[in-house]
Image: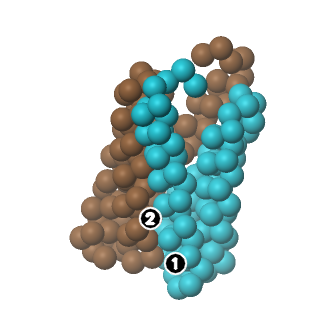
Chain colours: A brown, B cyan
Amino acid sequence: MGQPLYVELLGSCAALFTTLCWLPQTIRSIRTRDTASLSLATFSVFVGGLILWLIYGILIGSWPIIVANVLTLMLNLVILAQKLRHG
Amino acid sequence: MGQPLYVELLGSCAALFTTLCWLPQTIRSIRTRDTASLSLATFSVFVGGLILWLIYGILIGSWPIIVANVLTLMLNLVILAQKLRHG
């Protein structure tokens, strides 16, 4: 990528954190069915933005952007579905 | 950036969506003080990841990454503070 290794490792850690962090929220929204304090606007626009990031990643051919956004999108689609179902 | 204009516009839209989407959740968590269905683990790790993205943006000198992550970080620090305060 033209960056020193420690910079690329830091970026990979950043991507890992902001992707995997959605797992506990997804599990919680499935288990408790409590989504009352989640903002519908936030998670709708977030999912829309993740879809745009995914298309962007495909267009520029960046595998890290594609993989990170596919995973984040899948988790947040479940959260959004739970919000739409349980309010 | 070496990408066609429409690709850069798409990327900018993606960044705008995944940044500004946090505004309604921030306002909601301040107004209602209800953060019960938010996952503490999710928002802690998300904030940690945003700090890593910010350092990464500074190290590679990318203004879009810096600006997007400063804004997203500020909004999510408020959400995390509300979660820590109100549970």
> Dot 2: within a 10 Å radius of its alpha carbon, few (fewer than 14), some, or many (20 or more) residues?
many
User: Residue A5: x and y, percent?
Assistant: 69, 17
Residue drawn 56% across the image and 76% down it: B27
Residue drawn 42% across the image and 34% down it: B6
Query: Which quadrant, please, contains the N terminus of chain A?
Result: top right
Q: Estimate the spatial distance between the alpha carbons at disc 1 and disc 2, rounded to whole Å.
A: 10 Å
Numbered tag placed on residue A12 in the rendering? none
Q: Is residue A82 left or right of residue A1?
A: left
**Of the residues shown, which amino acid type is indicated by label 1?**
Arg
User: Residue B75: x and y, percent?
Assistant: 62, 63
Q: Is residue B46 visible?
A: yes
Residue drawn 45% across the image and 76% down it: A37
Instruction: Classify B7 as above or below A21.
Output: above
Find residue B79 and report its image quarter.
bottom right
Co-location on one chain, circles 1 and 2: no
Q: Is residue B8 left or right of residue B54?
A: left
Instruction: Classify A14 as above or below A26.
Output: above
Q: Is residue A72 visible?
A: no
SS state under label 1: helix
Residue position for label 2: A42
Q: Chain of mark 2?
A: A
Residue position for label 1: B28
Q: Do the residues bearing badges 1 and 2 touch, measured as CB atoms within 8 Å? A: yes
Query: Which quadrant, please, contains the C terminus of chain A?
Result: bottom left
Q: State the residue lying farthest toward the left.
A: A85
Q: Chain of mark 1?
A: B
